[in-house]
Image: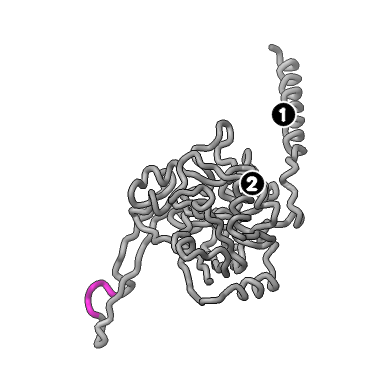
Amino acid sequence: MDFLKRTLLVIALSACSESAIAQVAEHKEPWWDSPWGEADRLGNVNNLSAAGVKAAAGLVRTGKVYALGVPTAPESAAYGTRKYTVERQPGPNADYTPNGSQRVTSFDERIVSSMGIGTQIDGFGHLGVDHHYYNGVTGKEVATTRALQLADVPPIVTRGVLIDMTKHYGKANLEVGDTYNRAEIEAAMKAQGVTVGKGDVVLFHTGWMAAKMMSDKDVYRSREPGLGEDGAIFLADLGVVAIGSDTVALEALPSPPGKTFIVHQTLLAKKGVHVLEAIDTNQLAADGVTEFLFVLGIPRLVGTVQMVINPVAIS
């Protein structure tokens, strides 16, 4: 091939590449558009309000406080290969030798861990669709900037709702294959006298944590009953801020064929609703509490897209 032909071929290929790039740049999915505008990074957290806080505070009757987080430890049941390790070390200038007349000693610690272990919140940068995340934020932005980091999410103080699916199914704990969608959720809500509204946090009690977390960790962290795609869309469209359960991944696992983690994709990327996992709902369910003041201040560790949490319910 002579020089002229090679030159023309390079020009033609370059033009094709530029055209392909332009087409990709112009491509846009409908779900990218947040109702709160192009700059929005909070999703349904925008539904929180001072009026909602005051109304939720009015739900406090007994003053009983429930810790909804489980202890995070090396032996915690965790999804996949996530691990947590902690090493206690002598504090600065206090290396086991009593320091001065006060005999001061101290310890610090070093933790190496995924932030997605134990009781946790999933941020919008955690899971996406084809390298795009909530409101069309690209994977490159998530990887190289602080886009969609949980440190930017304000405290979540609002009305919490517990839907007890063990009552709906009539058994102590749900089993693998039990997937609840809009029909099951609405039936459970009606039977239990529960309503769900804009700005709420919804928690599901499945009994799975009590049944499996300690007795069979491999099962607990790999297969579970849970929320289905239709149910996720139903609740998200009601305007809820977050949805959680006493399971490690909220949604039913294994996923339906061809729809791996479809509930996560639906809630986090498409609907702007946070996912709460491994929430300890056992005592709330035992006490028959269905609505409460929900309080969560997310640790402000810069750059994270998941975070270990200990939310609180007050009835």
| 287 lies above or below 177 | below
Residue where numbered disc 2 is placed:
182
Q: Position of residue 147 (x, y in %)?
A: 62, 54
Residue at image position (47%, 46%) is 174
Q: Position of residue 111 (x, y in %)?
A: 38, 60
Q: In the rendered image, which residue does mark 1 sit on?
A: 17
Q: Position of residue 129 (x, y in %)?
A: 63, 41
Work out whether residue 310 can be spotted.
no
Q: Could you say where residue 11 lies in the image, as x and y percent from the top left?
A: 75, 24
Q: Quick check: is 221 in the magenta stretch?
A: no
Answer with the quarter of the image where residue 261 lies: top right
Q: Residue at x 47, y 50 (%)?
A: 247
**Can residue 126 be spotted in the picture?**
yes
The magenta stretch spans residue 96:
yes
Labelled pair 1, 2 in contact (Cβ < 8 Å): no
Magenta residues, as a range? Answer: 94-98
* Residue 1 vs residue 268, the one in the foreground: 268
Which mark is first along the chain, 2 or 1? 1
